[in-house]
Image (cartoon, coloured by chain):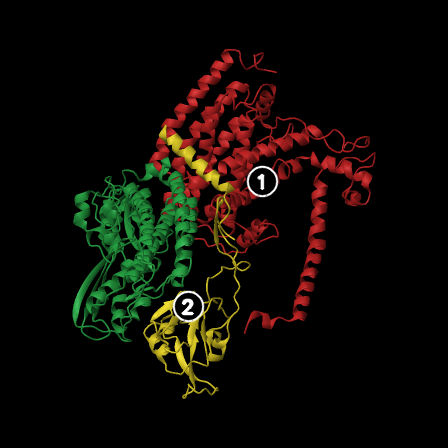
Chain colours: A yellow, B green, C red
Amino acid sequence: MSSASGFIKAIESGSKHLVIRRFTFRYPEEKLRFVGDGYQFDPKKGVGIAGYRGRHILLHDKCTGCQLCAIACEGIAEAIGMVKVDENWKQNKKSIMPQIDYGKCVFCGFCVDACPFYALFMTNDYELSSFTKEHLIYTPQQLEVKPKYDGDIEIKITDRGATHG
Amino acid sequence: MGLQVVKETEEDRLMTLSVGPQHPGSGHFRFVIKVDGDYIVYCDPDPGYVHRGEEKMAEYRNVIQNIPHLERPVIHDSNNITYAYSLAIEELMAIEVPRRGQFIRAIASELNRQVYTLYWLAIYGIFLGHSTMFMWPAGDRELFIDLLERLTGARVTHAYNIPGGVRNDMPQGFKEKCLSHIAYFEKRLREYEDIFYNMPLFRQRTEGVGILTKEDAIKLGVTGSVLRASGVPYDIRKVEPYDVYNEIDFKVQYMKTCDSFARSYVPFLDMKESCNIMRQLLDKMPDSGDVRTKLQPNPKGPPGESYRRVESGRGALGYYIVSDGTPKPYRVKISVGSFRNMLALNHLLVGNKLADMPSIYWSLNYWPVEADR
Amino acid sequence: MSYTESFRFGEFIGSVLWLVFWVLIIFSLVGLPLLFVVLFYVPLPPLGDTPLTPYLFLTMVVDPTRTVPIIKFLIHTDLFRVAAFPGFMYAALIAAATIFIERKFLAKMQLRYGPLYVGKVEGILQLMADGLKLISKEIIVPAAADKPIFWAAPVAFVAVAGALAALIPVAPGWVVADVDVGLLAIFAILGFFPLITLLFAWASNSKYPFIGGLRALHQIIAFEIPFIIAALSVVILAGTLNLTGIVESQMASYWFVFFLPISAFVFYISSLAELERIPFDLPEAESEIVAGWITETSGMIYGLIQLGTYVKLYALAALFVVLFLGGWAGPVIFPQEILPGYTGEKIYNPTTLSAIFWFTIKTFGVIMLMLLPRGISTRIRIDILLHTGWYKLIVLSFINMFVALALIYGGVLGPGGLLVR
């Protein structure tokens, strides 16, 4: 008779789930909320600050064109190349800044770890699709723009189950 | 033309099936089986569909750049596969990891073990035709992926453990969230028992099927949950404790029945024990401190070799690294649990029915991408 | 260069006008004559004393006094009975509703949404989208397959499933084929299914369908016997093989499920096995033999087989309702007149409508019961299946047959019995 009780327990467990709230969240209408502003790295202390590793943001007034981010990425994904920019900054004598190819980037964040001047951070933006491969290469001007990301869904555990709300 | 009487040969009776990469029940792996009616008489595994040359490529990158690359063989369990690598490099270069960093590494490793085991359980459910058991673990995995995303910054490709510690400290409020998710997850584990492990049809399909005796298991060299399901209480976290595992009090989960049911139940018991371990780790963790030792930009150490092992979701995962004094390693050899468990596939499938093939194959905890590296 | 950049409004209007033109041409050159030809062969009633010609019929929409008698006449023709009401359209609509309900029900049990975006309300048009997709796919026939059987078997599958649904009475007097030995005819038709499955599997000329076809053969044959014996105990209590007669004898006493619970349970398990539903879906086991005997189907052939499977599900659920749950028995809930004080032409028959209502509700209840094991159970293995089918279920069904015999001989049921109202 243990098999009958096994079946009955299974039916009970399955039917219990008809009143538990559903777990999926509907992506384009609802977006996940990230705590913080994105992954950052503090070169003085040598440790990172927790955050989501999305698209990069380049602070033009701190970047000196030292190429350390490109050298770090060479062994990983070869996604960063240095290009000449039109801007004139005091700290950037050669006027070169990184451009990132998101077709190759694996979003590991080691370029952020490599930057010693607090110039390269990562943000919460991950919606980077485009229609052509050339549009995926983000120039330094595009990398300067801080993206607007407002998501407000996170996992809430209630007594009727866990849901995204 | 008259009729001829043709005698049926052995070759005519057997049907060759290729449970190949294009099969809903095999993953990125092929094995050729010959079937006589409903019984399997011959099995020939054919790995290599996902071979990418990870070990060779690791020789062209320096120690830190290897991390995103070496976590790819088992991307679901990335914190464990980079854990072994970091331990081996730290032994080579004599790097000390601060205490808080060791605790955070262990927490990330346990969280990843849950993520991997839940994924494995989901696929096990769908292999046996239980679509609900596919959806529930896949949904509950989100709880842990959410935690890992708060901690490391990415949902699956963490790149978090590096030689020297971890990359960043825990964010605010992580400990409370972790404890609440673990409490909810333990309630879900009871539901899994009701609908899957105690379901009479599942038990009939897996009890007594694919018996791997203790002597055979030790002789074939299987590892991980497969070994523990055959009655050998061997867990690397107890046998060669690394980092802070010698301060944690936990029991090695093993079963003596050696069949497919035991192999599917031991990871479940492991998950329960893992929740326990995580609570102790969160408790004992020092409140503040460094999480990482600062290294020079191109770290290099004296020539030498080192071998360190870690208990991952599939078994013993070891790295053997030989260094010749330059920043790039001379030879990296990854010894994975999946490849060793594959030997048991041949031994177990022959003589069993075709209908038992999914339950035996997946209970061996074989991850094709890792076995091919 | 994206697709949105090459859109020209003028071309869009041109294509819409072209479409309208073709619809008008097809309707007037083909549709209208077809309608006339059909009406030519349907014997139309005389209206008053003038015989009704097809032309006059088409003007009925203009003159309301002609509409109601014409519609009532059409509803009672044979063509309507076969094609629409208790026949194919009804079965196909319930089958389509079942597919949608199954997906949403399972999704709710698995804590997810199911079809959601097609159609404004929770994905209700998903079925239509799936149907359109299947129609537009290419049908790939394997090179060495046996082409006549490969094309004929799915159509035969749907036809036999439709034949099964044709024997089920939905309301008193509403059955497509009122056969005196209705239950025996159902058993005979059920015997076709393993044959069609095996023919199709063999004609596919491939290894996985071959294994699936053999498994289907073993499974369906093994479970036909408990199915028949469980149904026979109902025949013993009712005294007739005619399905309408069985329902009427349940209306005279109580529903048979109270007297024959074990038979109902055996019938339920056997019909799950006949329908190849989880836990008995070995012939289509996805992780072991790719898709079993339907591996080589694609496009509309797959669509036909799914339609046939779900029509069969409706037929067997309806059979369960007829045999054990009293068919259409239930209180009359529709009012006698459509509005109080209305003394005109009688528009509907309240007994028939409540019979249809109760029957549909009970059928949906039984269908939900048949959908439930898919959410909670794994697949069974073939030797456990055969062991269960040949040993356990036959013994259980015999038990209830003896109970039924005892009830008849003890004078509890049957003519003049104690519990007969």
Residue B20 x %, y % = 33, 54
Left or right of residue A38: residue C321: right
Q: Is residue C187 left or right of residue C128?
A: left
User: Residue under mark 1: which chain is it in?
Assistant: C
Q: Which residue is mark 2?
A: A39
**Label 1 crowd bin: few (<14), some (14–19), many (20+), radius 10 Å:** many
Between B45 and C213, the residue placed more toward the observer is: B45
Image position of C342 with respect to C260: above or below: below
Tag 1's secondary structure? helix
Residue B159 is situated, as x and y percent measured from the top left of the image, at: 34, 65
Image point (69%, 53%), residue name: C30
Give above or below for C260 relative to C150. above
Residue at the (61%, 26%) spot, across then down = C329
Position of residue A53 measured from the top left corner of the image (x, y, whole percent): 42, 67
Question: How many numbered marks does the figure carry?
Answer: 2
Residue denoted by label 1? C94
Nearer to the camera, C171 or A63: A63
Q: Where on the picture, by quarter, is residue C68?
A: top right
Circle 2 chain:
A
Q: Amino acid at mark 1?
A: Ile
